[in-house]
Image (cartoon, helix red, strand yellow):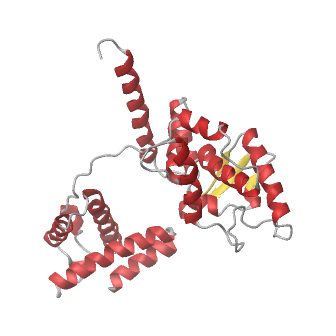
Amino acid sequence: MEKSVSQFLDYLKFERRSSVNTVAAYESDLAQFESYMTLNFPDVPVLNAEPVMVRAWMMELLDAEMTARTVSRKVSSLRAFFRYHTKIKNVKVNPMEAVVAPKVAKRLPQFVEETDMENLFSADLFEDSFEGWRDRLIIELFYVTGMRLSELINLRRDDINLYDGTVKVLGKRNKERIIPFSNREKEVIEKYLQLFDEKYPDFPKNNYIFVAQNRNKIYPKAVYRIVRKYLDVVTTIDKRSPHVLRHTFATHLLNHGADINAIKEILGHASLAATQVYTHNSIEKLKNIYNQAHPRA
C-alpha cells in the first residue's frame, strides 16, 4: 500500500474518527484503484493519477458489469482521497475535478407500512420469555427511536434514563445525541431488564443491554436475523433489515407532520439533505392517494 493511501486512512481513523466499516470501505476502494494503477501505469504513483486514468478505471469497472451506484461510490472514495491530499498540499491540481461519476438513478428508502407495523406489535408474535421480550425491545427501539444498528448493539444500562424517557446513543464520529421514547416503550424496557437480571444475576449492572451467549455484546448478524424473522411475517418488501426500520421511523414521523429538522436531529444526520430523502416517500404516498381518489387521475 502506497504511503499516500495509508496516510489518508490514518486521517480517517484518528482525525475524522470514522467508523471501522467506513475506513474498510475506503481502504477497499483505494486498494482496487492502486492495483489498477500498478498494472496499467506502473511508473505513475497514485497521487499523480490523471483524469484520463481515473476515467479508464471507471470504464473498466462498468465493463465488468459493476453497477453505476457502486462505481459512483468508488469515485467518491477517490474524491475524498485527493481532496485530503490537495488540502495538505501533497497534490497541486486535484484530478477528480475533471472526472464525472456515472449517473445513478435515485432509489427511495424502503419502509414498512404503518398497518404492517401495527400488525407486528398487535399479533401474538413475541413469546413471553427472555428471548421474546429481547426481540420485541430490539424491534421497538429501532422503530421508536430510529437508532442505527451500531448504536443499538453498543447500548449500556446507563444510556437509558427511564425517569426522563430518553436514551443516549453514540453515533458516527463519536457524536452523542439524546432520543426520547414513550411510556409504552418504558414498560417494555423495564420488563426486559427485569428478565435480564433474572437470567444473569451476577452480570455487571452497566454492561451491554443486549448480549450473546458468551456474554459479549450481541453480534450484528444476530440482530439482522431477529429483525428479518419478524418482518418476514408482516411485509413483503425486498429489504427487511434494521436500517429499514430506521427508514420506517423517519417516514412515519414525516407522514404525521413532524418537523424535518427535528427528524434530522433525532437521526443524527450531519446535513438536512440526508433527511430530505424521506420527503420523497411522502410525496409518492400523496401521488398514490391522488391517483386512486381523483376522478380525473
Asked if 159 appears above or below 275 in the picture, the reply is: below
Towards the viewer: 126 or 218:
126
In x, y percent, where is residue 122?
66, 36
Q: Quadrant of residue 90?
A: bottom left
Q: Quadrant of the C terminus?
A: top left
Q: Is residue 232 visible?
A: yes
- Left or right: where 211 falls relative to 297: right
Q: Residue at x 55, y 32 (%)?
A: 115
Asked if 145 appears above or below 68 in the picture, the reply is: above
Q: Residue at x 17, y 87 (%)?
A: 42
In x, y percent, where is residue 219?
60, 67
Q: Quadrant of the N terminus?
A: bottom left
- Left or right: where 245 falls relative to 52: right
Asked if 157 appears above or below 124 in the picture, the reply is: below
Q: Quadrant of residue 65?
A: bottom left
Q: Is residue 259 visible?
A: no
Q: Residue at x 81, y 57 (%)?
A: 195
- Left or right: where 144 falls relative to 95: right
In x, y percent, where is residue 254?
51, 34
What residue occupies the far top of the structure in this picture? 295
Q: Please count the marks in the image.
A: 0
In x, y percent, where is residue 36?
22, 79
